[in-house]
Amino acid sequence: MKILITGKDSKIAQELLRRLKKNKVVAYNKAELDITDIAQIKEVVIKEKPSMIINCASLNDLKQAESNPEKAYAVNQYGVKNLVNISLDYDIKLIHFSTNYIFTGNQTEPYVETDRADPLNIYGKSKLKGENEILNSPDLKYLLYRTSWIYAANDDFLISELKLNSGQSQASYYPASALATPTSVSLLIELVIRSIKKNLTGIYNVSCSGFASQYDFAKEVVKICGINIKIKAKTTTDSDNILTPRFAVLDNSKISKDLTINIPEWDEELKHQLEKHDN
């Protein structure tokens, strides 16, 4: 099986390349393959002849999406539509990543795959439109993953910031009101690879178990790494006046059941990742 990965420079794509290095994999960054250009996609597919496309190309920046909605929809909706059409034309299975930001965050229980989506911002709305391009194509072979708060222990701004500020006298403040599930990119890709090997299809929430705020996450990083810094909670309004879900927690029981695997709590996984990368 030959796999084509788009969005080569993303965290998800880089972890896929690391884990799939024994497979036939080709990866393209945005400069090499712009998914908003269907002619480019077709040219690459004819050249590479993949049996699977893993789409890691996405516009994820909330501020950029709000300031340039046309670009957000071009990438997150119409780029996905192009991949869907090419996948149908060439009988290719499409793997795509969406987000917990398609939900309003008004629930008090984790969101399951069948819950109604009602995004608050342009990023979430454009990602939901991309989902619908896939879900409204009944003949498409696909896996659609909704993800939550993806981090890499060796490449995460918050973790790096805490380590850099170790020993400073003033406290560091982190938001405590918005809740989601920190999920390592390593665990995400482990579940993706397992589901590909098991030939799963459909839509899945993929995240660690439990939930946390940035404040909770920062406190846990400090505890695990022994960082000398005071962490305090702050109540915040949405940054830059961009509405975001207050409770963007995904229920991962479907993929846990279908893969017959126990998915760890977010703090257990964080400890595992930080200890692994610090050694």
Image: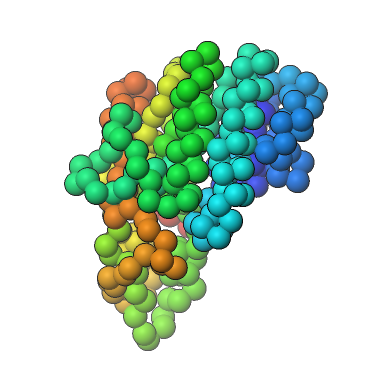
Q: Residue at x 30, y 23 (%)?
A: 257
In this rendering, position of residue 125 left or right of residue 31: left
Residue extending farthest left: 108
Count of labels in the image: 0
The quadrant of the picture occupied by the N terminus is top right
Q: Residue at x 45, y 44 (%)?
A: 125
**Which residue occupies the foreground of this view, 129 or 232?**
129
Instruction: Examine the image and state in which quarter residue 239 appears.
Output: bottom left
**Which residue occupies the foreground of this view, 270 or 112?**
112
28 relative to 60, above or below: above
In this rendering, position of residue 207 left or right of residue 72: left
74 relative to 227, above or below: above
Q: Residue at x 44, y 18 (%)?
A: 200
Q: x%, y% of residue 96? A: 53, 32
79 relative to 124, above or below: above
In this rendering, position of residue 233 left or right of residue 186: left
Colouring method of the image: rainbow
Q: x%, y% of residue 51? A: 65, 18
Instruction: Examine the image and state in which quarter residue 85 appears.
Output: top right
Instruction: Examine the image and state in which quarter residue 222 appears.
Output: bottom left
Residue extending farthest front: 70
**Which residue occupies the foreground of this view, 19 or 60?**
60
* Residue 104 can be seen, yes or no: yes
Q: x%, y% of residue 161? A: 47, 69
Q: x%, y% of residue 240? A: 44, 68
In this rendering, position of residue 175 left or right of residue 6: left
* Residue 13 can be seen, yes or no: no
**Which residue occupies the foreground of this view, 68 or 61?**
68
Q: Residue at x 38, y 71 (%)?
A: 227
